Image (tube, rainbow, N blue to C red):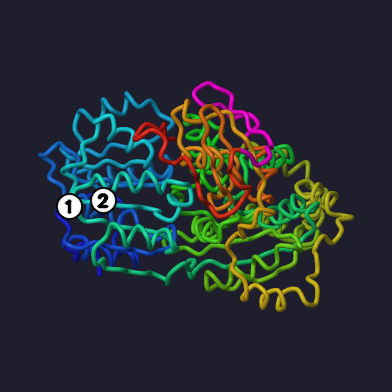
Amino acid sequence: MKFDEMGLSPDTLKSVQALGFETPTPIQEQAIPILLEGERDFIGLASTGTGKTAAFGLPLLERVDPDATFPQGIILCPTRELCLQITSDLKNYSKHRQSLHVVAVYGGSPIMTQIRELKRGAQIIVATPGRLLDLIERKAVKPDQVSAVVLDEADEMLNMGFKEELDKILSRMPEQRVTWLFSATMDKGVTRIAKNYQHDPVEVSVGGRNESAANIEHLCFMVHEKDRYQALKRILDFLPEIYGLVFCRTRAETQQVAEKLMQDGYQAESLHGDLSQAQRDAVMRKFRQKTISILVATDVAARGLDVDDITHVIHYKLSDEIAAYTHRSGRTARAGKSGVSIALINMHERRRIVDLERRNNIKISLEKVPDGKAICENQMIALLNKVIDSPINEEEIKDYLPPAYEALCHLDKKEIIKRFVSVEFNHFLEYYRHASDINVTPRSNDAKSQGRRSDNRNSRPRTESADFKRFSINMGRANKINAGAIVRIICENCGIKSNQVGEISLGHDQSFFDVKKESADAVREGMNNVRLDGRKVSVRSATPQGGGRQGGPRQRSGRQGRPGGGRRY
């Protein structure tokens, strides 16, 4: 099937063809005909990078009335990057429908500017949940005539602590609407959203639930913790043509790794939440233009990253969330291309690889970190290919060749080649001349026996009190903040998932929260220089107090706060 056989309007089809789209991806082929009918709720499960935006965007554009300027369709997504990317795509799809307006609203940008834009009229709003709820409560957005709601990356919105906002937003939408839910995974939280807010949905799954794309090769390298950065450098050197993403867990780690790479001569930049929007845009412009070839990023910052040619995704450190592996890996192998996902692990993380294999129905091959000889061979081949493929402008260089011929005439061909290779290559030879083997050999009972143990235990974080660390934070109800906002501040600044956060006890001007002990250092580091509305956020270790028990299941007290009064981010 092709796009011109799907029943799209001539104007939409014209825009699609101008973008070079001819054959739909599997999720588009299955979803678009169902959504064009516009009568049923829908669940679409597909890996990141499989064309989900067009799968819901094209049918949504078809169902709105461009002559009516009130909101008719709302798309909710987890981050501003994804919000902006979806908006850009929809504007491209509707280029030949001049009266149709798409507006993006998201946190981190002046709300009054967005309100003014909304007043000009918008048929479709693309939004992050916190900002949309704020606009609804200010009556800047009236959702009473919305006929279609799209939840994109629903699993990640829940991971980021947007459950409360999603519930409030969806409860205010008209009952006579359709709800389209798109996700890479179908965990319990997403299932609950579907059960509560959808009626008899059609479900389409491309590649199976919770599976990574089939055209991604999955590898892992086991090293001692102290050799993690050295292993990253060797992998990058072994892949001279890499155009890739390196994922870290925290903002501080992201910045540190990126700075080390730049100091060591790699074309790298960082992408994380401490950057302003202008800085993020500048980094992404460099990456898309391939001025830089390595982007070191946090999970949150990389959401919505829409680049088709990424060859490799490197997990510098695995996320605590199983589903994050799918989201990260899905940044490669987009638009039908193939890609490689590489995880760096220490010897204690082997069982996590077994869990990932089982949960995602994939095989992650344990490989050896390349040695110096293999790296030098790859670098030499890449250099020679570059020379062979270099275009020659005979007219412009002809005046410069005679001196070159004269300078080299006393050398034979082999001697010229040896000297040429040495000029470009000596630094690699020197660096790796005495390079040692940094691979760790798994213990004999490691992979298989750990795999058996892993199969017999729940991979979700345990909730005994001994597993949690309590912190205090200098904000509470007096700052118009709720528990959900505290969760997001922690997750976005510390690079941890919401399931690492335990109980939250809200006070008047001070609150307490628990995090898993393995994330405690990330919280201390990530919250060190955070400011909120110009005020320094102070987070300190604390002991249980005020009736809130240390750790325990994720019962977040104080969520009620002031009805509808919490500030949201």
Front residue of this view, candidates 339 and 536: 536
Q: Mark 1 points at which residue?
A: 62
Mark 1 residue type: Glu
What secondary structure predominates along the stretch shown in magenta?
loop
Q: Where is residue 403 in the image (x, y as percent from the top left)?
A: 72, 38
How many numbered marks appear? 2
Q: Position of residue 178 (x, y in %)?
A: 21, 56
Compared with 333, 69 (above or below) is above
Q: Residues within 10 Å of mark 2 (few under 14, many from 20)?
A: many
Q: Where is residue 502 in the image (x, y as percent from the top left)?
A: 57, 49
For residue 534: magenta? yes
> What residue sits 42% from the left and 71% below the top?
207
Labels 2 and 1 touching (C-beta < 8 A): no
Front residue of this view, candidates 24 and 465: 465
Compared with 24, 474 (above or below) is above
Taking the view exactly as shown, the residue that stands out farthest to the front is: 547
> What residue sits 26% from the left and 68% below the top?
202
Mark 2 residue type: Val
- The magenta segment is 527-545
> Any mark on residue 149, and which?
2
Q: Residues within 10 Å of mark 1 (few under 14, many from 20)?
A: some
| Quarter in which the N terminus is drawn | bottom left
Disc 2, SS? strand
Left/right of residue 325 with respect to residue 226 in the rendered view:
left
| Quarter in which the C terminus is drawn | top left
Residue 266 is at least partly visible in this image: no
> What residue sits 37% from the left and 43% below the top?
165
Q: Where is residue 463 in the image (x, y as percent from the top left)?
A: 61, 57
